[in-house]
Image: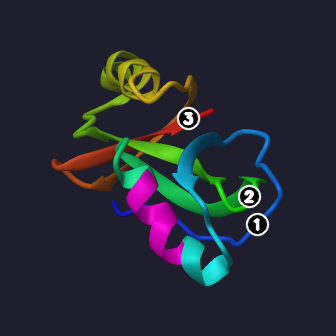
Amino acid sequence: MVFPLGVFFTAGVKSASALTVKAGPIWNNNDAQVKCPVATARIGGIWNGGWRTTEWGKMSECDVDWVKAGPIWNNNDAQVKCPVATAAVGGTWNGHWTTTVWGVMSVCAVK
C-alpha cells in the first residue's frame, strides 16, 4: 500500500499538530520548495508544505507531520517503533502511522 503524502502551501501559518524544523532564512515559497525538503529530510521527516519566517532574514521553520521509521509490520510493531522515531526528532507520536513502501518504509505521525 502506498500512502499519498500531499503537500499544501501554508506559509506563515503553523499547523497545530506539526513539528517544526529550523531551515535558515527562506525568502519566498519558491525558496521554501528547495530548502524545506532538505531541512526536514535531515531528521528523517517529510515536509508537509507549511513554513514560516520566525526572524526576517535569519531564520524560518518548516513543518513536518510524518517521520520515517523503517518497515512497520503491524500496529504492535508501530507501538514500539513510532515513539522512538518521533522522539528522535524531538516530537511525540500521535498514534497514526502508515506504510509508504511495503516491507521497506513506514512513517509515523509526529506532533
Q: Residue at x 56, y 46 (%)?
A: 22
As drawn, 103 above or below 74: below
Q: Position of residue 72 (x, y in %)?
A: 27, 35
- Amino acid type, residue under disc 1 in the picture: Thr
* Labelled disc at residue 21: none
Q: Secondary structure at mark 2?
A: strand
- Amino acid type, residue under disc 3 in the picture: Val
Q: Which residue is mark 1?
A: 10
Q: Give the residues in magenta.
A: 33-39
Q: Earlier in the sequence, mark 1 or mark 2?
A: 1
Q: Which residue is mark 2?
A: 52
Q: Secondary structure at mark 3?
A: strand
Q: Position of residue 98 (x, y in %)?
A: 42, 46
Q: Which residue is mark 3?
A: 110
Q: Which of pointers 1 and 2 indicates the residue nearer the eye?
A: 2
How busy is the neighbourhood of tag 1: few (under 14 within 10 Å), some, or many (20 plus)? some
Q: Residue at x 54, y 26 (%)?
A: 91
Q: Secondary structure at mark 1?
A: loop
Q: Which of pointers 3 and 1 indicates the residue nearer the eye?
A: 1
User: Which quarter shows the N terminus?
Assistant: bottom left
Q: Residue at x 83, y 57 (%)?
A: 13
How busy is the neighbourhood of tag 3: few (under 14 within 10 Å), some, or many (20 plus)? many
Q: Earlier in the sequence, mark 3 or mark 2?
A: 2
Q: CA distance from mark 3 to mark 1?
A: 18 Å
Q: Earlier in the sequence, mark 3 or mark 1?
A: 1
Q: Position of residue 20 (x, y in %)?
A: 62, 42
